[in-house]
Amino acid sequence: MQDILRNHSSKGQVTKALLFALLLLLLVSSTMFLGNQGEVDEDLIRQIDPIVLLVGQGIFSVFMFIGVSFLFIRVVLRLPIREFFTKAPWTMIGLAALIAFSFMVVNSAVAEWNLNLDFPDSKFEDWAQNMEEKLKIGVDYLINFTSLTHFIVAFLVIGIIPAVGEELLFRGLIQNLFVRVFKNHHIAIWVTGLSFAAIHLQFYGVAPRMLLGVVFGYLYHWSGNLTVAMVAHFINNGLALVILYLGTLGTIEVTPEQMESAAPWPMILVFGVVCVISLRIFYQRFSNIDG
């Protein structure tokens, strides 16, 4: 892990930095929440070019995750930005990519279970389903690729920008600060993972997204290199987009609905073993912590 509070030696300065971080998290979460209120006019959405919508989403993501994080790093933490984008060995990057891919297969079972959770006669379920349906309308439209340009823009906005911005905010800043708050990196990683999942406002995807955040968190904690978490995040998002695009082209037979289903159990078991072994090797080879 990185000591991002090293320029704040006094207790008062540390407290100030932590308060700024909590305000930052509150700002992002409240903006995401308010942006998803109200009814969604599907006909109106479909009158807008999906590339235009993607560009708008990209601008928002760059500002909210990358821009605000950069400001926090430079103004509050007084650190050089380059510390969060250090070069990682290719063996570390390759192993992180293998972990991300194998965990995608395993996590598909958790995703399907979470998607089918039922809370009968519950106001919470009504709210969660309504939120899920609104988000699904927009997402389905954005990933219904109509051209190579559409795919490339989506790949940038959904695959690359979140991998950089969300990892910079959640692992690079929030997780580091939670380690200082809780004095325990395990608690910090899991709380950050939960925050990472909750901010997406999709209850029917909170469990798999939280576990993803936890995996990214441990990769970052063990290696001390945020680039590794960014690569793992990119593999998870980018590979899903590539599969969907190939399905659109007819190269492979896959639909967005099929992507929501769990992989066959033999495959899950095999990749589960691969994931555990890869995580163990990663920890043994690259961990720079004392315990």
Image (cartoon, rainbow, N blue to C red):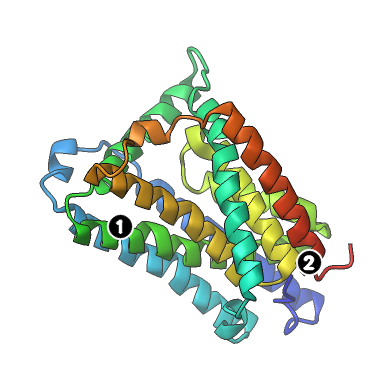
Of 242 and 36, nearer the camera is: 242
- Tell me residue 146's x, y (percent): 17, 50
Taking the spot 51% from the left edge, 48% from the top edge, the residue there is 199
Label annotation for residue 154? 1
Judging by the rendered image, the residue that carries numbered circle 2 is 285
Rendered view: 11 above or below 109: below
* Figure quadrant of residue 91: bottom right
Q: Tell me the amino acid under the disc marked 2.
A: Arg
Q: Extreme top residue here?
A: 121
Rendered view: 15 above or below 108: below
Taking the spot 37% from the left edge, 29% from the top edge, the residue there is 130
Of 162 and 37, nearer the camera is: 162
Rendered view: 254 above or below 74: above
* Figure quadrant of residue 84: bottom right
Quarter occupied by the N terminus = bottom right
Taking the spot 21% from the left edge, 58% from the top edge, the residue there is 148
Q: Secondary structure at mark 1?
A: helix
- Tell me residue 46's x, y (percent): 14, 43
Q: Is residue 84 left or right of residue 53?
A: right
Q: How many marks?
A: 2
Residue at mark 1 to residue at mark 2: CA–CA distance: 35 Å
- Tell me residue 44's x, y (percent): 13, 42
Q: Secondary structure at mark 2?
A: helix
